[in-house]
Image (cartoon, rainbow, N blue to C red):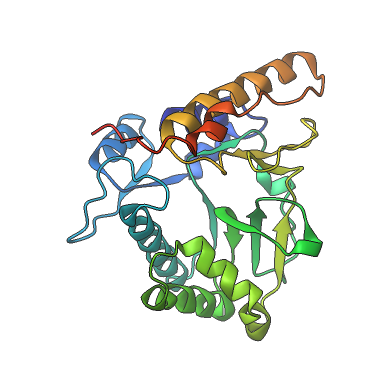
């Protein structure tokens, strides 16, 4: 997964220089060693009493714990006064996002969504977002992390969605930009325009082998587009679609 993520920076438009500013947070020794081998900026997130080695299958207890630990880490980064452009490693960067993100300084947060459907509410996705460090966002992340204690069995994204839906964002006076899937795409809803697509996220997918297989096809589609500049459809995400039926799937040790 990491190699595919990094390859997208090499193949993307204007993305290669961004690798110098990327900080990769590893949760296991394998990823950390691979990061060091690639001579990137690497940080090992050590958590006492929690085994984060290897893949954590979507919505397993270990997966949920890992997501909450990630939220705590990001809260700590905000506490130190740093703005964050966060990305999961199952997001391919095909163009630099800085020309697509709003430069409106009054925005506190810009976050990806699974689908463009404003009438049904914004289905946010925490796999890609930009957040400014200020009192409002610190209060949001602090409340978000604290809610884990009263949200058993819920992943952090669902809890953040609950805070949005129940008006906590408005209560804080947060200014939020919800990124459209034409530019910030994903498997839940493909971008219809390769001419503007910026990132592609392997969301709506249960496990890593399926993500790697289908993201490899996405990168192949992108390479073909760069050669022809013909706006074709993306390859179907069959492996990810079928991953929800893999009830017997066991991650490799």
Q: Position of residue 16 (x, y in %)?
A: 57, 32
Taking the image as shown, residue 30 lies to the left or right of residue 105, namely left
- Which residue is found at the position 56% from the left and 29% from the top? 8
- Picture quarter containing residue 97? top right
Is residue 71 something that shows in the picture? yes
Front-most of residues 152 and 106:
152
Instruction: Report the front residue among 181 and 99.
Output: 181
Q: Determine whether 180 is above or below 6 in the image.
A: below
| Residue 11 vertical position relative to residue 22 in the rendered view, above or below | above
Residue 47 in the figure: left or right of residue 149: left
Identify which residue, 90 or 120, lies in the foreground: 120
Q: How many numbered marks appear? A: 0
Residue at image location 68% in from the left, 81% down from the top: 170
* Residue 121 image-quadrant placement: bottom right
**What is the quadrant of the C terminus in the image?**
top left
Residue pictured at 42% horizontal, 29% vertical: 209
Question: Would you place residue 91 above or below residue 13 in this image?
Answer: below
Q: Is residue 1 visible?
A: no
Q: Position of residue 141 (x, y in %)?
A: 49, 73
Which part of the image, by quadrant, shows the N terminus? Answer: top left
- Relative image position of residue 72 (x, y in whole percent): 38, 67
**What residue occupies the far left of the structure in this picture?**
49
Quadrant assignment, res 175: bottom right
Locate residue 41, reporting x and y percent. 38, 43
Q: Which residue does the image show at 65% across and 53% down from the upper left?
A: 112
């Amino acid at each position: 997964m990491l190699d595919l993520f990094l390859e997208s920076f090499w193949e993307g438009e204007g993305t290669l220089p961004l690798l110098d500013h990327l900080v990769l947070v590893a949760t296991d020794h394998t990823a950390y060693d691979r990061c060091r081998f690639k001579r990137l900026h690497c940080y090992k997130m050590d958590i006492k009493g929690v085994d984060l080695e290897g893949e954590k299958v979507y919505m397993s207890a270990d997966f949920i714990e890992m997501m909450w630990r990630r939220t705590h880490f990001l809260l700590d980064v905000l506490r130190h006064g740093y703005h964050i452009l966060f990305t999961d490693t199952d997001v391919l960067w095909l163009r630099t996002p800085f020309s697509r993100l709003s430069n409106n300084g009054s925005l506190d947060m810009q976050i990806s969504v699974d689908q463009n459907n404003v009438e049904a509410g914004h289905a946010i996705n925490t796999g890609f977002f930009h957040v400014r460090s200020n009192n409002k966002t610190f209060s949001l992340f602090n409340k978000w992390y604290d809610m884990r204690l009263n949200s058993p069995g819920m992943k952090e994204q669902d809890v953040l969605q609950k805070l949005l839906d129940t008006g906590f964002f408005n209560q804080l006076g947060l200014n939020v930009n919800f990124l459209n899937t034409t530019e910030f795409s994903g498997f839940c809803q493909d971008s219809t325009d390769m001419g503007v697509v910026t990132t592609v996220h392997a969301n709506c997918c249960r496990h890593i082998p399926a993500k790697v297989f289908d993201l490899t096809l996405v990168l192949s589609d992108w390479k073909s587009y760069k050669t022809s500049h013909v706006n074709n459809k993306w390859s179907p995400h069959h492996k990810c679609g079928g991953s929800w039926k893999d009830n017997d799937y066991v991650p490799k040790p």
